[in-house]
Amino acid sequence: MGRAFVYVILGGGVAAGYAALEFAKRGVSPGELCIISEEPVAPYERPALSKGYLLPEAPARLPSFHTCVGANEERLTPKWYKERGIELVLGTRVKSADVRRKTLLTATGETISYKILIIATGARALKLEEFGVNGSDAENVCYLRDLADANRIVDVMQPCSGGNAVVIGGGYIGMECAASLVINKINVTMVFPEAHCMARLFTPKIASFYEDYYVFKGVKFVKGTVLSSFDFDSNGKVTAVMLRDGSRLPADMVVVGIGIRPNTTLFEGQLTLEKGGIKVNGRLQSSNSSVYAVGDVATFPVKLFGEARRLEHVDSARKSARHAVAAIMDLEKTGEFDYLPFFYSRVFALSWQFYGDNSGEAIHFGDFSGSKFGAYWVSKGHLVGSFLEGGTKEDYEAIAKATRLKPAIDDSAMLETQGLSFALAVSQKPSAVPPVEISSSTSTVVLKKPVYVWHATAGVVVAASVAAFAYWYGRRRRRW
Ligand SMILES: Cc1cc2nc3c(=O)[nH]c(=O)nc-3n(C[C@H](O)[C@H](O)[C@H](O)COP(=O)(O)OP(=O)(O)OC[C@H]3O[C@@H](n4cnc5c(N)ncnc54)[C@H](O)[C@@H]3O)c2cc1C
């Protein structure tokens, strides 16, 4: 026995919420759409879990952060789904899928069939056991991927005030959890094997700014080593963390953020996989034309860089989901997904955004002892990535636009001198004729020369004026 739907979204996270909103905007009929999620709640903005959710005062709680508030859209409460006849099958794990028969089998024994399936299963947190360390099931060892994990951290954290936490991992989750633990008055030591934090994205110079800031907030860093084992008390609680370099860190709680694995298992052997995710085309369609994949689980072509990528960020989940639904509902009018990778984080009073790709040469700019600084990445003579800490909305829009335009860079010293002014100038250029063209044969980026020359000249003139103004303005401000 089972139910049948036209559209089924498998997974009830960020991408599912944005897909539902797009379906509703495009006029899905009651009874046509179903969302199946292992989580017991309607889709929510997952990034809140490591930020507002862990605050000691006035913490964020559902229903305040159901999707799609993160993109300033409607907040989709359970009532919203009900009013539109969208079926929410919550607290239900799908244990197998048959893409040939177009069916999903749930852990409760129900077979749900679909005409079109959107896979939005996201990813799971990697466990210490996968690296040969036991102890994940101790009551004071925490991970953070879903609401249940966040509730566990809150419960474990509360009696720990004034005590010691060890955070394993120096990526997103580690950095954001460490900040939240400090705000909860817990002494934090971060342990990771790399030479600096956020090693996949930050340059050593950027990382050193954040590490110094964290040290100022009381965080200790132990770098270049990994966890080897735990010490437990008689109740099975962790009391200390043993490191491979021989040191021992007393711990009242441990938070582990050592990476994620996309949830592809249900489809292995049935759909084509690439780079760890489900391979999709520019319309987010998998190797089976009735199956789409979006969010963290999808490996999609990033047109701007001429290669397929799997991203683990909320903006990509939101936009890929909406694009897939547009393609499903209106294929004729829906082009290829043309996405500019975008990541952000907020910790303490700091806030940064990154656009594009961090490949090639990194050129830093701004005041690393102040509150606004950044970096550009230049690869094969073009700007391919931009990072900015402490920017305004306009600054972030400017680095995003400049990165998308991929202007040619002949002189990296110029970039360093002009800094943010360069992006502000480039982003103000008239964009009637797009300067960037992707060559379909080679997937390399070429600039149309006459347009480029005009743009480059205009860009340099505007940049120079902006830089001059900024210098003058800066001097005036310093005098005040
Ligand atoms: C704590 C935290 C903080 C973050 N902060 C940021 C940030 O600041 N900036 C940023 O850019 N990104 C951030 N991210 C990443 C961002 O949240 C993800 O990229 C985004 O959630 C991906 O959306 P998704 O829908 O693909 O997957 P998810 O949101 O993970 O949703 C997947 C859903 O599928 C369900 N599911 C999986 N398998 C099954 C199954 N077999 N049966 C039924 N249901 C299933 C899961 O239970 C879940 O509900 C953060 C992530 C976390 C965990």
Image (tube, rainbow, N blue to C red):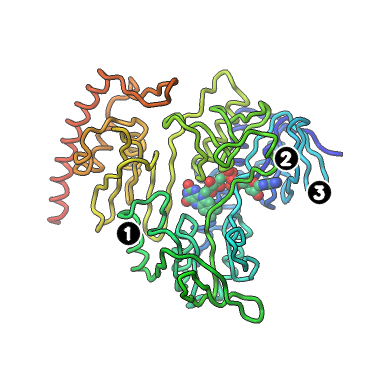
Residue 264 makes an appearance in the image: yes
Write the residue at 56% across / 76% down: 159
Question: Residues under labels 2 and 3: Cα distance?
Answer: 16 Å
**Do labels 1 and 3 touch, CB within 8 Å?**
no
Q: Amino acid at mark 1?
A: Ser
- Mark positioned earlier in the residue sequence (2 or 3): 2
Q: Residue at x 60, y 71 (%)?
A: 140
Element marked by disc 3: loop
Q: Which mark is residue 208?
A: 1
- Measure the C-alpha gap from mark 1 to mark 3: 50 Å
Q: Position of residue 388 (x, y in %)?
A: 33, 47
What kind of residue is marked 3? Answer: Thr
* Residue pointed to by mark 2: 87
Q: Residues within 10 Å of mark 2 (few under 14, many from 20)?
A: some
Of 123 and 419, the residue lying toward us:
123
Left or right placement of residue 134 versus residue 429 in this view: right
Q: Amino acid at mark 2?
A: Glu
- Asked whether, in this view, residue 450 is left or right of residue 432, the answer is left
Which numbered disc flags the more N-terminal residue, 1 or 3? Answer: 3
* Viewer-side residue, 189 vs 248: 248
Residue where numbered disc 3 is placed: 108
Q: In the figure, is residue 109 to the left or right of 412? A: right
In front: 193, or 19? 193
Above or below, 129 against 415 in this view is below
Q: Mark 2 and mark 1 in contact? Answer it, CB < 8 Å.
A: no
| Rendering coords of residue 145 (x, y %) | 58, 55
